[in-house]
Amino acid sequence: MDTATCPRCHQPVNSQAVTCPHCGTQLKAYGHPGIPLHRATGKEYLCDTCTYHADDTCNFPQRPFAKECILYQNIEESKQELQQQRYASSFGATVKSWMKRNQALLLLLALLFICLIIALSTS
């Protein structure tokens, strides 16, 4: 059983639970038990750090004062994901990936190169 922690009473709960069995706090979006419900902590609003608020594509009625949202996407996490995607598609990462997949070919080419050097040095 995957467990999570209730944001209100901090008791362990099943990660699939729609409400906390201890305090009754709603943990998933109403009517959508597969979608997590993001909650603001403290006095901050979710919109302050949400990607959709920043790029003005949010149409949530509680915007910009939302304390709970199912579509919340943290700006910092989005930036980190974008950087990881950029690195994964970079030339260096592509070469490393190719070399990892073709280790046998590279070993064979290295042996052929060594044989060629030996043959040229003995003649």
Image (tube, grey):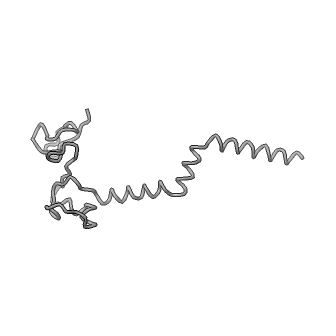
Question: Which quadrant holds the N terminus?
Answer: top left
Is 47 on the left or on the right of 116, as rendered?
Answer: left
Q: Position of residue 104 (x, y in %)?
A: 64, 40
Q: Residue furthest top?
A: 1
Taking the image as shown, residue 59 lies to the left or right of residue 88, namely left
- Image coordinates of residue 80 in percent, x first then y, are 37, 57
**Residue at 42% over, 58% down:** 83
Single out the residue that lies furthest toward the right.
Answer: 123
Please report the residue visible at 16 percent of the width from the left and 63 percent of the height from the top. 63
Residue 77: quadrant of the picture? bottom left
Q: Nearer the viewer, residue 11 or 66?
A: 66
Q: Residue at x 85, y 48 (%)?
A: 120
* The furthest residue to the left: 23
Note whether 99 is above or below 67 in the view shown. Answer: above
Q: Residue at x 80, y 47 (%)?
A: 117
Instruction: State the image quarter where residue 85 is shown.
Output: bottom left
Q: Is residue 35 left or right of residue 111?
A: left
Q: Position of residue 67 (x, y in %)?
A: 15, 57
Is 102 situated above or below 65? above
Count of marks placed on residues:
0
Q: Position of residue 90 (x, y in %)?
A: 51, 57
**Residue 72's quadrant in the figure?**
bottom left
